[in-house]
Image: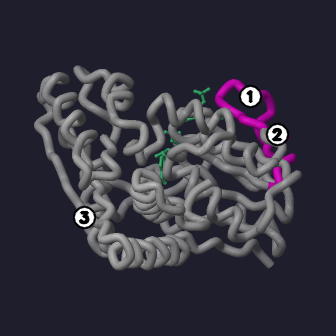
Amino acid sequence: MTATVIDGKAFAAQVRAQVGAHVARLGMDHGLVPGLAVVLVGTDPASAVYVRNKGVQTVEVGMASFEHKLDAATPEAVLLSLIDLLNADPAVHGSPVPLPLPAHLNAGLIINAIDPAKDVDGFHISNVGLLGTGQKSMVPCTPLGCLMMLRDHHGSLAGMNAVVVGRSNIVGKPMAQLLLGDSCTVTIAHSRTRDLAEVCRGADILVAAVGRAEMITGDHVRPGATVIDVGMNRRPDNETSAGKLCGDVDFAAVREALGPNGWITPVPGGVGPMTIACLLANTLTACCRSHGLPEPQGLTA
Ligand code: NAP
C-alpha cells in the first residue's frame, strides 16, 4: 500500500468556487467587484503563462481583470508611475508584478512601491514583517496554498514536526512562518544542511521547495508523513523538447516509502493550481479589508 495523493487541482477548484460565491455576495450586498491588475514586464515565458491563466480564472470567479504588458526595456520610472496609478485606483484591489524582472529593474524597489494593502503576492517588506511577527498580513500565495492543503488534511497542525527544505523569501521562509504560526515545531533546511535525509526523516510534514528535480528520495521520509512538493522542474525526456515537468520529490519512490498512512502532492496537479487560487483569495481578502468588511473564512492564514 502506498501513500494517498492529495489532489491539488480539485482542492484549488473548491477554493475558486468559495471565492466566486463570496465575490457574488459582495456584488449583491455592497455593489463591489474585486479587481486584480497584473503588471507583466518583459517576456519571461513562465510569467506569461501564469498571467494568461490568472486572467481566465479571475474572470471565472466574477472579478475584474486588468493586464498591463510592458516592454522588457521599460524604464524604472515608467513602471513606478504605473504602480502609483494602480495604488490610487479604487477599482484595483491587487496589483502583483510577477518576478523575475529584467535585470535593469530593481525588484526590491518595485515590489516595495506597491501599496502593501494591494500586495496580493505578499512580498512587500511590510507584509513580510507582519507575517514574521504573527500579525494580519497579505500572505505569499504558494505557501498559503500549501498551508490550506495541510489544514484540510490534518485539521490542527499544532505540535507536528515540520521540515521545510529551501529558504527563499518567496517560498521557504514564509512557509516556515506559516507553519510556526500554526504551532508546528519547524526546521528550515538548505544547501548547507548536514545530513539532509536524516533531518527530513524527523518530519511529520515535509515541504520541498528546492528547485532540483526529484532530489527528495524514499530515504528522506518516514512512513506516515505528509510530503508537499513545491518544486517545478523540467527533466529532459525524449518526447518533448521542453522536458517533462517534475517536482523536487521522486514521487513514486517517496509515495512507496510513506506507506498507507502517508500523504503526498503530485507534480503537476498539486501545489501549482493552488497558487493562482490563492492569488484570487488574496485579492478578495484585500477588497474586503479595504472596505472594512468581514474577511471570508478559511481563505487566508
Ligand atoms: P530558490 O530561490 O532557488 O531557493 C531554493 C532553495 O533550495 C535555497 O534556499 C537553497 O539553499 C535550497 N537548496 C538548493 N539546493 C539544495 C540542496 N541540495 N539541499 C538542500 N537545499 C537546497 O527557489 P524558490 O523560488 O524557493 O523555488 C523552489 C522551487 O519551487 C522551484 O522549483 C520553483 O520553480 C518552485 N516554485 C513553484 C511554485 C508553484 O506555484 N508551484 C511557486 C514558486 C516556486 P541555499 O539558500 O543554501 O542556496
Give x and y (percent) for residue 178.
67, 46
The residues tagged by marks 3 and 1 sit, at their Cα atoms, a distance apart of 45 Å
Q: Identify the residue at horizontal 13%, vertical 24% (top origin).
A: 75
- Residue 199 is tagged as 2
**Res. 17 image quadrant:** bottom left
Q: Are marks 2 and 3 in contact (CB under 8 Å)?
A: no
Where, quadrant-wise, is the C terminus in this rendering?
bottom right
Q: Is mark 3 within 8 Å of ligand 1?
A: no
Mark 3 Cα shell of 10 Å, populated few (<14), some (14-19), many (≥20): some
Q: Is mark 1 within 8 Å of ligand 1?
A: yes
| Residue 66 seen | yes
Magenta-colored stretch includes residue 201? yes
Q: Badge 3 is on which residue? A: 64
Magenta-colored stretch includes residue 89? no
The residues tagged by marks 2 and 1 sit, at their Cα atoms, a distance apart of 9 Å
Q: Are marks 2 and 1 in contact (CB under 8 Å)?
A: yes
Q: Judge by depth and name the residue closer to the eye, 101 or 95.
A: 95
